[in-house]
Image (cartoon, rainbow, N blue to C red):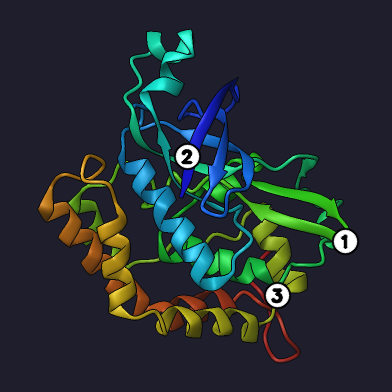
C-alpha cells in the first residue's frame, strides 16, 4: 500500500487519465507513483483489474512495476486546484511505481532483454484474464537498461476481461474461452524465445494459488470499488475457474512454439 504525499501532475497518456503523485510505501520509502483515480472515466472496475494484476504480479514474480492501493488524503487533494476542480474524492485509488528511463519494446530491441522468460508468465496472465491490450497498445510493453542488462516491464492492466468494464454476464461468457494473441511482440516471443516448459512453470504456479489467497484478494478490494455482492462472488468464481484452467491455457500457447517436430501458425 501507498500513502500519497504530494500531487505532481497529470501523466498525459491513457484512457484513465493517470496522475503522478509522490507517495510513501509500507517500508517508508518515497516513490513516484502513476495513479489511476477512482473517478476515472472508465469506472472503478478498472482499479479492481489493476489490483488483481498487482496481486498476480506479486504471487508469480511477474515483470509488473510494484503497485497497489494508494490512500489520498483530503489535505493532499486540497493542495491541488486541478484535483479540487475535478472533485476527486479522498480515500483509496490505485497506484503503481513510475519507471524512469524506459523505451517501448519493438522487434529491434526485444532480443536485448535478459528477462524474456518472465514474459511467459505475463502472456499466461493476459490469456487467463483476456487482456488484448498488451499488444494492441504498443505502449504497454517497456524496456529499460539496468545494471544487469535490459529488462522488460509490462504495464497497464486496466483492460482485463476484454474491455475493462466487465459484467457478471461477460465473466460467464469468458470463463471457458481463450483467444490466442500472437500479435507483435507476443508472436516474436513465441516463435524465437519462449519454450513450453516456461509456460507450464507459470501455469503450475497459478495452479498452486490457494483459495484463501483469492479470498484475501477479494477482501482487499475497497467496498466502494465493487459494492455489488453478486459481482464480487462472480469475480471470485471466475478466478477459481481460470486457475484450474491454467495448464489448458499454457497448452494453447505452447502450440505456437515451433520445435523440430512441430511447425508454427505464426507468420
Of residue 254 and residue 122, the one placed in the foreground of this image is: 122
Labels 2 and 3: the sequence-earlier one: 2
Binning the other alpha carbons within 10 Å of mark 3 as few (below 14), some (14 to 19) or many (20 upward) gives many
Relative side of 65 to 45, left or right:
right
Relative side of 222 to 264, left or right:
left
Q: Position of residue 198 (x, y in %)?
A: 64, 81
Labels 3 and 1: the sequence-earlier one: 1
Q: Which residue is mark 1?
A: 149
Q: Which mark is residue 192?
A: none
Quarter of image, res 38: top left
Binning the other alpha carbons within 10 Å of mark 2 as few (below 14), some (14 to 19) or many (20 upward) gives many
Residue 87 visible at all: yes
Write the residue at 30% across / 66% down.
216
Q: Check the image and name the residue furthest to the front.
A: 28
Q: Which residue is mark 2?
A: 3
Quarter of image, res 149: bottom right
Q: Secondary structure at mark 1?
A: strand
Relative side of 266 to 122, left or right:
right
Q: Position of residue 100 (x, y in %)?
A: 75, 39
Q: Position of residue 215 (x, y in %)?
A: 26, 69
Of residue 171 and residue 224, the one placed in the foreground of this image is: 224
Amino acid at each position: 500500500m501507498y500513502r500519497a504525499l504530494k500531487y505532481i501532475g497529470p501523466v498525459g497518456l491513457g484512457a484513465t487519465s493517470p496522475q503522478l503523485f509522490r507517495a510513501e510505501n509500507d517500508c517508508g520509502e518515497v516513490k513516484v507513483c502513476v495513479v489511476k483515480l477512482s473517478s476515472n472515466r472508465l469506472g472503478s472496475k478498472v482499479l479492481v483489474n489493476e489490483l488483481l494484476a498487482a496481486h498476480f504480479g506479486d504471487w508469480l514474480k511477474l515483470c509488473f512495476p510494484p503497485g497497489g492501493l494508494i490512500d489520498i488524503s483530503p489535505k493532499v487533494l486540497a493542495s491541488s486546484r486541478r484535483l479540487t476542480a475535478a472533485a476527486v474524492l479522498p480515500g483509496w485509488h490505485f497506484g503503481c511505481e513510475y519507471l524512469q528511463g524506459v523505451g517501448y519494446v519493438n522487434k529491434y530491441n526485444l532480443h536485448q532483454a535478459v528477462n524474456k522468460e518472465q514474459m511467459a508468465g505475463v502472456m499466461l496472465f493476459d490469456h487467463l484474464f483476456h487482456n488484448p491490450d498488451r499488444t494492441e497498445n504498443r505502449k504497454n510493453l517497456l524496456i529499460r537498461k539496468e545494471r544487469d542488462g535490459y529488462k522488460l516491464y509490462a504495464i497497464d492492466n486496466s483492460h482485463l476481461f476484454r474491455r475493462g468494464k466487465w459484467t457478471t454476464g461477460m465473466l460467464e461468457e469468458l470463463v471457458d474461452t481463450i483467444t490466442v494473441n500472437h500479435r507483435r511482440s507476443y508472436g516474436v516471443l513465441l516463435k524465437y524465445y519462449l519454450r513450453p516448459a516456461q509456460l507450464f512453470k507459470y501455469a503450475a504456479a497459478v495452479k498452486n494459488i490457494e483459495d484463501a489467497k483469492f479470498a484475501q484478494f477479494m477482501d482487499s478490494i475497497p467496498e466502494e470499488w465493487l459494492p455489488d455482492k453478486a459481482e464480487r462472488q462472480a469475480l471470485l468464481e471466475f478466478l477459481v475457474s481460470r486457475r484450474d484452467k491454467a495448464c489448458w491455457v499454457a497448452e494453447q500457447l505452447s502450440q505456437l512454439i515451433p520445435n523440430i517436430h512441430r511447425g508454427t501458425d505464426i507468420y
